[in-house]
Image: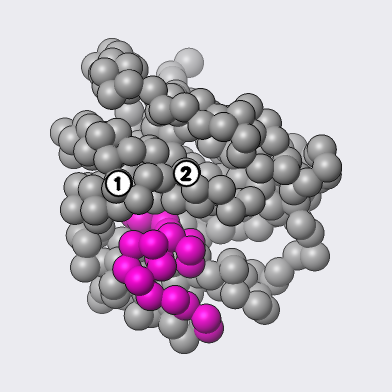
Amino acid sequence: MSAPPRVLTVAGSDSGGGAGVQADLKTMLALGVHGMSVITAVTAQNSLGVQGAWELPVEAVRAQYRSVVDDIGVQAVKTGMLASAELVEAVAELITGTHAPAVVDPVGISKHGDSLLAASALDSVRTKLLPAATVATPNLDEVTQLTGLRVESEEGLREAAAAVLEYGPRWVLIKGGHLPGDAVDLLTDGSEEHWLRSPRHDNRHTHGTGCTLASAIAAGLAKGRTVPAAVGAAKEYVTGAIAAGFALGAGIGPVDHAWRLRA
C-alpha cells in the first residue's frame, strides 16, 4: 500500500487539544493525509484561554523541520503560531527552500484574545513569511495587525485582500467570520475572486477554526487540488466541524474534527 500525501504543520502545541498542532493533526487524519509536526512553542491552554507560552529555540525548530523534510518529504506545509521574529524568519527560510505549497496562517491572537505573536515579529511576517506563502489565511484581527485596516463589513474584504497581497503571497483568503451575518470569506490572487459563504451556526464552540481551516487547505493542496478547489473543500469541512462543535471545560469548546465519521 502506498503512503498517503504528507503534510507538515509548523506551529505551537495546544495542551487543551482544540487548536494548534493538535487540531492540525486531527484535521489531516480526518482528510486522509499523513500529518507531521514541527513544534515551535508550548502553551498552557484550555477552554478559558492561554495561561502561558514558551517558544522553542530556533535550532530545535530547524532540526525538526530538516529531520522530517529531508527523509520523509512533504507535499504541503502549513504554518501557525511562530511567536517571535527569529522563529518567523527561520521558518520562512525553510519553507522557501522546500518545493511544496505553503499555507501561512499568520497567527497573532488566540480565540480568547491572547497574544501569540510578539509585536516585534510583525515586520518579519510581512517581509519574510507572507512572500513565501502559496495561500495566506488571516482573520480580521490579523488583517488589522498586519495592515492597519479595520474591516467592519463584507464590502471591506476586497480592500483587505489587496492590502495583504501587497506583501507577496500568491493567494490570500480573508476570513470574515468575525462579521455579523453569514460566514463570508474572500479568496483572491488579485485577478480572480472566489466568495465563500456559509450559514452561521448558533454555536460558541469554535476553538481551533483557523488552524483547522488552514490545515484542511494544506491537505487539499497535498492531494493535488488547485487553490480554489482546496479552499472550497476546506471551507465545507470546517463549517461542518463548527456545526458539530461541543462543550469542553468551562469556556469555548473545540470544533469536532471527526464530524464526518459521526455523520
Q: Is residue 105 visible?
A: no
Q: Is residue 121 visible?
A: yes
Callout 1: SS? helix
Residue numbers of the magenta segment: 134-153
| Residue type beneath disc 2 | Leu
Image position, residue 180 (x, y; %) = 65, 77
Pick whichever, 150 or 133, lies toward us.
150
Q: Quadrant of residue 15?
A: top right
Residue at screen point 30% across, 46% down? 121
Distance between the Cα atoms at labels 2 and 1?
Answer: 11 Å
Image position, residue 54 (x, y; %) = 47, 27
Q: How crowded is mark 2: few (under 14 residues within 10 Å), some or many (20 or more)?
A: many
Per the image, the residue denoted by label 2 is 116
**In the figure, is residue 137 to the left or right of 241?**
left
Circle 2/circle 1 CB separation < 8 Å: no
Residue lying at the far bottom in this picture: please name it.
155
In the image, residue 144 sits, relative to residue 51, either above or below, namely: below
Residue at screen point 61% across, 39% down? 50
Question: Upstream in the sequence, badge 2 or badge 1?
Answer: 2
Q: Which scheme is used to colour this image of the protein?
A: one colour
Which of the labelled discs sits on residue 121, or is there none?
Answer: 1
